[in-house]
Each structure stands twice: as structure tokens, then as C-alpha cells.
Amino acid sequence: MDGTQNSAPQTVEVDVDSDSALADDASTASTSLAESIFDYRRENGRSYHAYKPGSYVFPCDEKESDRLDLQHHLFQLTLDGKLFLAPVGPDPHHILDIGTGTGIWAIDVADEFPSCEVIGTDLAPTQPSFVPPNCKFIIDDAEDTWLFGSTKFDLVHFRVMGGCFKDWRQVFKHAFDACAPGGYIEVKDFILPMKCIDHTYAGTALEEWDRNMITASENFGKEICQVDSYKGWLLEAGFVDIQQRDFMWPSNPWPKDRKLKEIGKWNEVNITDGLEGFSLKLMTHGLGWSETSVQVHIAQVRSAIRDRGIHAYFSIPILWANLPQAVRHSYHGPYTPPVLELSVYNYDQMPNREV
Ligand SMILES: C[S@@+](CC[C@H](N)C(=O)[O-])C[C@H]1O[C@@H](n2cnc3c(N)ncnc32)[C@H](O)[C@@H]1O
């Protein structure tokens, strides 16, 4: 089976020879990740963003940044090196990445399209200092009014932003207003609960964790998975020609298919490294658990992730949609910098940061 096509999951064969050797790879990569030294809000040993503190539940420390870069590699494997699926023309002028994280996607896009201005926004300034000249980062909350003036984008991109917004509908409306006529929106995300090709996930700690994450995020006020509503909300915002492709990230290298096995190997590291960051703030605040209870729970989940006998996977939907040509915006006007003085980082002027 071709992993990029990700057709009927029932056809994915289990590799019966799958052994624990790959799990050892995972733990080695995991332990090599360095501790965060960023001076952000500290809680239960992790660092969180300082702008609009408390509004996003995953950390922004070095450990999480390393995981995000690893997850970028997972997307690259999944999409055979493509950065987006929307049929953007060969010469885009402006591309916007909302919730850019470490900025790795935005930087790659800027390298691929040197004459395109690429802007990444985020709540946390975790992007590198050395970036291509056509790439810039802005600290901004995507749920606030967007500050791009008359600049309209050929592509507005969202990746793994589940759980980031109280009101996706409003965010999609902002994206519609920011898109150029004929431009695209692309949304890559993950689905919780995880899926499974057989019955091996039922009753596991992994299933329990999925349920806990969903309930905690609902209690927190930003649901972690609303993918089923995206299509309707995109239409409501005014986008047309909505397309969706679904990909598969196995929980570990359990599939026989070579490509899926490779993706599973990376995803095992992705989840086991991310587990603490995903769960700590969400479960302490959203479920009222103690840190110790969360740590006990995630230790069990980590074992389930490494278990080759559990044939679970994340469904990874990628949706893209078009803004009709007929929509009249002023197009490609000068860039209007955001006015939030303290929340804007211009890397040309930034003092060196100790890392
Ligand atoms: C799971 S990470 C994904 C990062 C990046 N899109 C990627 O694929 O590597 C989510 C990012 O969204 C940012 N974020 C969360 N809420 C946000 C908001 N309301 N506005 C802007 N960025 C936000 C977080 O700081 C974090 O960097």
C-alpha cells in the first residue's frame, strides 16, 4: 500500500516480525532532547508562552520545539516532500502561516519561493534568528483582529492547530478576509480519538488518554478536535471547492508497508516525546488532576504507544479550499505592520538570544 494514498485502513497489514529494536531507537532519540531554557511561564517543569499567558495548553520550550521540528519531518514524509497540497500557482506573492511554531514550515516555503513574502504568526517567539530574507515572524493571537492591512495572501496555512482556538468559525472568516481572490486556505490537522485497524486499541491506556484529552480540552474551552466541522465552517466563511485527503500516522512501526512503517517509527517518537507536554497543563487544569496523577497516566500511555500489538493510528486530514476570483479585495498592497509594539519581533533588530 502507498502510505500517501492512505486508502482503506482495514487493508493495512501488521508486520508480525516487528520487534522492540525500533522502540529502543525511539527512547534514544527521546532522551537526547535538551531541556528548555526559555524564560517563559513555568509550570510543572515546563515553559509556556508569555503573550496572552494561559491561553494555549502545550508548552513552547525547547523540548516541544524539537518535537515540532520532528513532526515537520513526519509531514514531509507523508506528503513526499510537498509543503502544501492546495494548487497554488508557481509564483505566489504572499503566504501566511498561522501558529507557525518553530517556523520550520514557513522557512521551507520561503526557501522554495524566494520571491514570495512568507509571514508566520504565533503566540510564542520560538522561531530562529536566522531566516531567509523573505520570511518574517509576528507574535499575534489569531483570534484577535488580523493586522495585515491590504496585503492579501495566495495561501493561508494552518497546521496542527486543533485545540488552539475557542472559535474556529471566526478564525476561518479572518482567513477568508486575508486571502487574495483565487487564493487558498489549507488546514492540516489530526483526529482524536485515534483510530485502529482492528480491536487492539479498545480498553487500552491509549484509548483512555484520548478520552481524557478530549474531555479536558472541552472543559478548558478549546476543543482539541473539531475537524468534522471544518468543511461546514469553511463554506460558511465563503470558501469554495473544498477538498480533503486523509493520511495515516501509525502509533509505532506496526504496519508491514515500508512507508507506513517509517512514518510509524517517527510518530512513535513524536507521541512519546510529546505526551507530557500534551497532557500536563490540559489534564491539571481541564480535569483537576495532580501532576503526579498525570505522570502515572502518561507512563501507562507511553507503554501502549510502544506496544506493537496495538494497531492504532492518527488520521491526518488535510483540507484546502479556494477563495472565489470574483471576491473583490485590494490585492498585493503594501504590507501594514501590526501595531502591537511589544508583540512584534523583527529579527533584523532583535538582540542575540541565548539558546
Ligand atoms: C501544535 S503547534 C503547531 C505549530 C506549527 N503549525 C507546526 O505545524 O509545526 C501549535 C502552535 O500554535 C500556536 N498558537 C496557539 N494558539 C494560538 C493563537 N491563538 N494564535 C496564534 N498562534 C497560536 C502555539 O504557540 C503553537 O506554536
Image (tube, grey):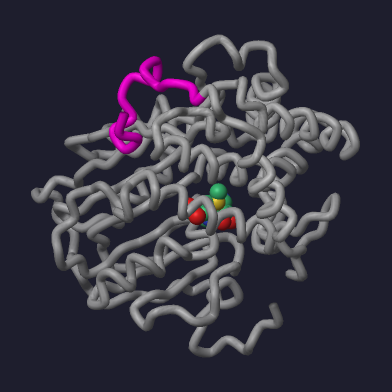
Q: Residue at x 28, y 33 (%)?
A: 5
Query: What residue sits 50% from the left and 32% below the top?
Result: 250
The residue range painted magenta reads: 1-15
User: Magenta stretch: dominant SS?
Assistant: loop
Q: Nearer the viewer, residue 233 or 208?
A: 208
Quadrant in the picture for the C terminus: bottom right
Where 97 falls versus 267 (above or below)?
A: below
Q: Is residue 141 visible?
A: no
- The quadrant where residue 334 appears: bottom left
Q: Position of residue 135 (x, y in %)?
A: 38, 75
Of 216 and 276, nearer the camera is 276
Left or right? Give the position of 23 relative to 188. right
Task: Identify which residue is drawn at 60% across, 40% down.
Answer: 268
Image quadrant holding the N terminus, namely top left
Q: Is residue 303 above or below residue 155?
A: above
Residue 328, visible in the rendered structure: yes
Residue 322 location (% of width, % of height): 20, 44
Relative height, residue 160 to residue 65 (above, below) = above
